[in-house]
Amino acid sequence: MTSAIPPGVPRLELSHISKRYPSVVANDDVSLIVQPGEIHAVLGENGAGKSTLMKVIYGAVHADAGEMQWNGRQVRVANPAEARRLGVGMVFQHFSLFETLSVVENIALVLDEKFDLARLAGRVKEVSERYGLPLDPYRAVHGLSVGERQRVEIVRCLLQNPQLLILDEPTSVLTPQAVLKLFETLKRLASEGVSILYISHKLHEIRALCDTATVMRSGRVTGIADPREETDASLARMMIGRELPVCHTEPYTGDAATVLTVNQLTLASDDPFGTALKDISFDVRAGEIVGIAGISGNGQAELLAALSGEHTVAPDRVVMASQPVGHLDAGQRRDHGLAVVPEERLGRGAVPGMPLWGNAILTAHRQGLRRYGLLRFGAARDFARRCIERFDVRCGGVEAAARSLSGGNLQKFIVGREIMQAPKVMVVAQPTWGVDVGASAFLRQTLIDLSRTGVGIVVVSEELDELFEICDRIAVLAQGKLSAAVPKAQTNAEQIGLQMAGLKMAGAHQDTETAHASA
Amino acid sequence: MIELLIPVLAATLGAATPLLFAGLGELVTERSGVLNLGVEGMMLIGAIAGFACAVDTGLGAWAGLAAGTLAGAASALLFAIPALSLAANQAACGLALTIFGVGLSAFIGQSYVSYSLPGMQPLPIPLLAQIPVLGPIFFQQSAVVYLSVIVFGVVWWVLARTRLGLLLKAVGESPEAAHAIGYPVLLVRYGATLFGGAMAGLGGAYLSTVYTPLWVQNMVAGRGWIAIALVVFATWKPSRLLLGAYLFGGVTILQFHAQTLGIKVPVQLLAALPYVATIVVLVLISRDRRLLQLNLPASLGKPFLPG
Amino acid sequence: MHLLEPRPQPSRRMRWLAPLIAVGLTLVTGTLLFLALGKNPLQAFIVFFVQPLSSGYGWSELLVKASPLILIAEGLAIGYRARIYNIGAEGQLIMGALCGGGVAVLTDGMNAHWILPAMVVAGALGGAIWGGLAAWLKTRFNAVETLTTLMLAYIANYILSYMVSGPWRDPGGTNFPQSVMFGDSALFTVLIEGSRVNASVFITAAVVLAFGLYFRNSFVAYQLEVGGQAPDAARYAGFSAKATVWISFLLSGVTAGIAGVGEIAGPVGQLNLNISPGYGYAAIIVAYLGRLNPFGIVWSGFLMALLYLGGEAAQVSLQLPSAITGLFQGMLLFFLLGADAFIDNRLRRSKKAQAAKAAIQPTAAAPTSPAALPHES
């Protein structure tokens, strides 16, 4: 972490970087300067081109035009290995770790040194302890929590003595408390002269951590600012060109009968790397949105499977409108008025290669889209067309393949398809994950409006801000256990964060990062 | 009884050798995430190439084995180009390779049906060959049998102890992650696929130049498929593959020794035994989904196209 | 080494162009092969593709061979759409023939109208049982179907071999492993005098129409398709994965089994070891070449039949081994799979071409943004 570079020379200088993909310009004439020891934010909403820009720096993507100066010297980074040799380390948004390998094996794969796992394990332990990122080098990655995995990625970078560390949306998988610990580590690294590029769309984090912010929108730089002197509103204007949209909530006045009850649900995971559910109970009333907070991997997938019917359980474990449905499969539960929007849009919520009318049939075949065992193609096209219009799905029409839609538009289509079946209960996972700000606001408002028509909604999400915006009550799923659902006015992000880490209210300042300790 | 069993066990090693070669090759291929169902075809191509080379050059079994190895690798390339570079359906490409191999070997083999080769003399290992019981079983084999055990040792060592082995496992688990940290995923997969082809070719050539040194159409007789099943049985671990290959070697030769061992079952049904046994071991191992999921290379059979 | 990038929309044109490209490339490679063998390619192609069709008898033989290929491929295509790889149709064909043939052997000497229908039913059952066995192994034990179906094909062959050299061997015949020649009540009526075309082609035609007009547009077929393209989506929608497996295997077992009866109660006329020249395997190629489409399969079935006839003609006229058919089959499938890659993908464009294209079309309005797609690496 030392450099013999004359003072005043930037660590990294990008000039006029452009990168085009067949259907989109990801980076358009982007310039960026990072000083030694600086924590530099790259701010922008989903799809603004931040990740592409980082991949260009890391050599994983080659720019079509533009130059890169490294410590005052012009370089062309051909591949990630070369980037690492220069001193660039990258912590990926979706981790680039191998589940079945141990921590030390994962790290050995990126180091260009003699293959000696025992020696490397010693160094891993030493470096991880020095930076407050404790790790057991011999544990298999599949047994680690999401936060621990992130530590592996960071330690892996640190072992290469980086001069620039890139973190892509590093806090999306962390509890609020773990975020603070990460910030401490990053500030310490910066004080040792390491430059940090911090990619995020979370305004308050950037204001808490970063020295400089470069803001991007639709592939272009729309502003450079000192985030400590900006407000959320001013940063948002640079990021999306207007104020952050806010949802409108009205109180529900209708009949608040219980529409969904989960009773003492205990369930082993199908996935050997999954988390078992332990004694989960909660209920949802008509007209309310119940949020389930927590970091993925704490039983979220298992709970969703049990709710949707993809995994059947004993009849009375899941009850819809006083009718036991636990033993019914996903299709049968839909017949009882359940609608589900899964986290994975392509491949689960929609068949990627099928046109939208074909994807309408997937769950809406009940709405008269089949007769005498035959498909009614006209009716299916009509259903898809109405869904596209009503939910403002921007696409190439009913014949467009699901995979040709952007994340936000596909999500609108799926949500719309489910709502048009007039459900009584709707389960939604990560409603706005990877969706741009405009579509997110639309989706959130749609869910609120739907609940106010008397539908009971369960939202499983990692985004605390989102849950506080749309939910009436919030529970936390951590290590396969669910806390009691609390009215949102009676709790706050800090409390929820502690529960996400699997801790009770007391004992707050221990290691806040032990979620998902099963496996 | 021991006197009766010694030749049976000794023959088992010989019968297991082609399965061991082909199985080790396929194991390495699958570890990298590539499912090549063309083993049967590659073995047939190796068998005819080896036989033709040995006959035409007169250079003996070793030349045949070398030719078979090369031909096997070359045939794997036919699979690799569509399956890897064009990201085509791997199962179907493997099938195409098998159909092609059956056709090609029969086509070339037509003019070699009347030939035979001298085969290969056993190579007793000094001292060890004299050990009672164990000597005749293990140490009076042909040199190729010893070679197969050496290949096993090398594959085991590379997979368990080297960076290359780790990389292979990593690419097989998550080509996306391997690509993200800068490894050439396709290159690794090409290498593993060609190695698989070379080993299948070697196994095939062993059949036609050493084990039964003549050419018979379709002489591999499903061993390629059994080798693929063995890889599943082995849960992608070389040491279990060794065990499986010897087990199946025993089952295959049972039919020839059944009479001496006093088993009275119609020949045709005895001949079906290895295929029945394959289904049985597949069932035994596959019913434990967790065990499979924990060991299966996660990206097996899924094409990889970097974004 | 990375030649391709995904298309935003699968190409419909490429879907139907791919088989033509594959046939074209196979012909080109064939030309090279004939040149290498010292044969005149033009003459070779005439022998292969023209000579077999130069007589009425040739055309009738084309139908005789195409019928079982089409019938089997229709069944296989259903499974392949669901990505269930039954590659042991040959075994299901043999078991169908064995069960149907069993009826004929046991009723030998009798004269009754029910014998042939009973054979067809027995054959359908035999094929269904053999296919169902693989379905059971997959649904109950999770055993991968590529291996089990193939192993079952080998086993079926040995059972056939045992039956025709043991219990069902023609007692009055030589020592050959074959059954008695079937009587008229156990044979399909010959439709055209002097040819081998028989009434079993009506079964094939009926299956083509049933699959093409009804099944293809059915909700069941849709469920199978979803299960094949996106298994998680099928689970999410509540479509049963087990039902998918069973339907696929039973349907392909039934069609292959009936095709087996069509052979033994047709051109073969008895049970012996040569009841199928690999129809069960060739039908795999027929299914893919016909785009897994019930009507497409009719054309590819005839093409494959022609390849068989050509192989036989090549043996006679060119002194080439008839195994050349297998060689062409393998090449055809390779080229087809390679060409199919271009349905969902296209060649990577050079940066210049991309830039030029981007300059013409303003791309900012394009809906897809790579950074917003989930699962990008």
Image (cartoon, coloured by chain):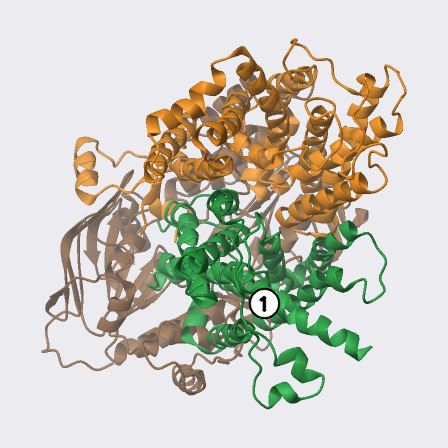
Give me the residue at 65% from left, 9% from top: C192
Colour brown belongs to chain = A
State the hue of chain B: green
Mark 1 packing: few (<14 Cα in 10 Å), some, or many (20+)? many
Res. B16 visible in picture: yes
Write down the chain letter for disc 1.
B
Q: Amino acid at mark 1?
A: Thr
Horizontal and vertical percent position of residue C17: 39, 26
C131 and A162: which is toward the camera: C131
Reply above or below: C291 against A48: above
Horizontal and vertical percent position of residue C65: 59, 24
Number of numbered callouts drawn = 1
Colour orange belongs to chain = C
Give me the residue at 76% from left, 40% from top: C160
C53 and C366: which is toward the camera: C53
Instruction: Name the image quarter holding the N terminus of chain B.
Output: bottom right
Which residue corresponds to mark 1?
Answer: B17
Give me the residue at 48% from left, 46% from top: B111
